[in-house]
Image: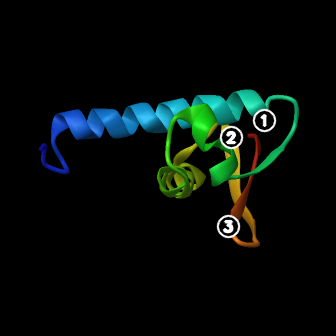
Amino acid sequence: MSAPNSPSSEAESQDKETRLKSYLREKADDGELYFKSKFIADDVDLSPKEIGALMVKLSKSATDITVEKWSYTSATTWRVQPA
């Protein structure tokens, strides 16, 4: 089992973030995208919990897309649009 800050786990985290960001950029290319993590989890091969954590991170760091926590009804709905 690797340590939380080991190079391999950090690289894996970057890979997940990159995969999610690429997916969102592609889907929001024509305008805006609204989604709940549980509905895209299979598409990006991540759990809804992982997606939620990455979305918070992307909302602060992404420069090519705008990420907004849009509403909450049984799960967070995210709004993504090109920056």
Asked whether the viewer can see residue 21, the reply is: no
Residue sitting at x 32%, y 34%: 12
Quadrant of the image containing the C terminus: top right
The secondary element bearing badge 2 is classed as: strand
Q: Mark 2: few, some, or many residues within 10 Å (few <14, many ≥20)?
A: some
Tag 1 secondary structure: loop
**Marks 1 and 2, Cα distance to the nearest angstrom?**
8 Å
Whichever of labels 1 and 2 marks the residue nearer the N terminus, that label is 1
Q: Answer left or right for 46 relative to 40.
A: left
Residue denoted by label 1? 28
Q: What residue type is labelled 1?
A: Ala
Residue matched to label 2:
65
Residue lying at 19% horizontally and 51% vertically, measured from the top left? 4
Looking at the image, residue 76 lies above or below residue 8: below
Q: Position of residue 66 (x, y in %)?
A: 70, 47
**Labels 2 and 3: the sequence-earlier one:** 2
Is there a contact, CB below 8 Å, between mark 1 and mark 2? yes
Q: Which mark is nearer the camera, 3 or 1?
A: 3
Question: How busy is the neighbourhood of tag 1: few (under 14 within 10 Å), some, or many (20 plus)?
Answer: some
Amino acid carrying mark 3 in the image: Ala
User: As drawn, is 72 to the left or to the right of 31?
Assistant: left
- What is the x, y in percent for residue 68? 71, 58
Label number found at residue 75: 3
Which percent across, then down, holds residue 49? 50, 57
The part of the image, by quadrant, that contains residue 26 is: top right
